[in-house]
Amino acid sequence: MTTGPVNTAAAGICYRYVMTGKPILLSGVKPTGDAHIGNYFGALKQFVDMQNRGTHECYFMIADYHALNSVQNAEEMRKLTHELALTFLAIGIDPKKAVLFKQSDVSAHTELAWIFDTLTTMPYLERAHAYKDAEAKGKEISVGTFNYPMLMAADILLYDTSTVPVGQDQKQHIEYARDTAEKFNRVYGDTFRLPEPLIMPEVAVVPGIDGQKMSKSYGNTIPLFASRAVIEEKVKGIVTDSDGDVPTNVYAIHKLIKSPERLAPLYEEHRGKYKVLKDALVEDLDAFIAPMRTRYEELAKSPKKVAALLERGGKQAQKKAEERMKLVRKAVGVR
């Protein structure tokens, strides 16, 4: 792999960014509440799969600065951050294979966001989905919400990221990062790699117990580390609209943990027997969740160990980010 500046003479461009190993994959999650199975199947499972695939150098970030837009209580922030770290570790994120860190442990995120602010116009940020949604609802919009895309662009571009796994509805975040990288490169010289979104269309929207998209805001979730009793309660509450004697919402959740081929005999034998099918879903969900739940509970007994893992990850991320910031500071003339 290339270990020095890449001179693309044919194109007349000399890139300051370098590739020293595997391509880098980065994703962040805000610490804003208990994880549910929609979070797992919609994103977290893919993080573990990509980590274990070994094709990328993976960075997984607890986006606590982003969360400040909604979490404005210090004790709650510390609690939610710790719980998200437990979640990452319990589902299988391995600090020996990936870098797990807190955004706030790397000061370069906010430093680079400010530099990007100086290149970014207000009309451009007014196009952001989060801003437009808040404006449409008549909310008083904080500067943090308005500026959200620039901090996210800094998150992505700091690490020479080539791949960012996102849902289709988050693609705009990558477009903002690419636009920002292109503008910086045009003004100051080629410094940033243009990241690509990794959109996984095979990951369908995970339905909640009411049939809508599973979301904490709808109160229709099944917690990722739920006890057997909670699983029973949640599954019992699934709305059972049917299609050909098959409870649609029950089946939609069930096929997340068992293939349609394995489920076919069960659903054929018990057509229209909603209680039997819900009982089967309880058994399968509990069997699926139990190992992660046990791991979470064990990790929760060792908060100092978890804190040490985050600290180590923060130092790794800081080192990587500082490599980029040395180039950025020199490019803009503050060094």
Image: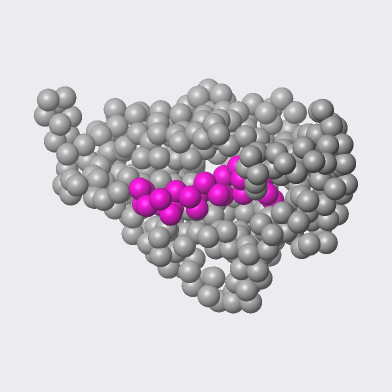
Q: Quadrant of residue 83?
A: bottom right
Q: Main secondary structure of the magenta part?
A: helix
Residue 122 seen: no
Please provide percent x and percent y for residue 202: 55, 34
Residue at the image point whose x is 81% and y is 28% from the top: 243
Question: Is residue 157 shown above or below 49?
Answer: above
Of 95 and 331, which appears nearest the observer?
95
Q: Looking at the image, which residue is at 41% across and 65% down?
A: 96
Q: Please name whichever residue, 203 or 73, is drawn nearer the observer in this view of the structure.
A: 203
Inspect the magenta stretch and tell me whether residue 233 lies in it. Answer: no
Q: Please indicate whether residue 265 sits to the left or right of residue 40 in the image.
A: right
Image colouring: one colour
Q: What stretch of residues is rendered in magenta? A: 36-59
Q: Quadrant of residue 330?
A: top left
Tell me residue 15's x, y (percent): 21, 36
Regarding residue 284, the answer to whether it shows in the image is yes
The residue positioned 33% from the left and 55% from the top of the image is 320
Of all residues, the one furthest to the left in this rendering is 9
For this view, does 8 lie left or right of residue 53? Answer: left
Q: Residue at x 68, y 49 (%)?
A: 37
- Is 209 drawn above or below residue 53 in the view shown? above
**Front-most of residues 221 and 67:** 221
- Residue 80 percent coordinates (x, y): 65, 60
**Labels in figure, total:** 0
State left or right for residue 221 relative to residue 67: right
Residue 79 spot, x, y in % from top left = 66, 64
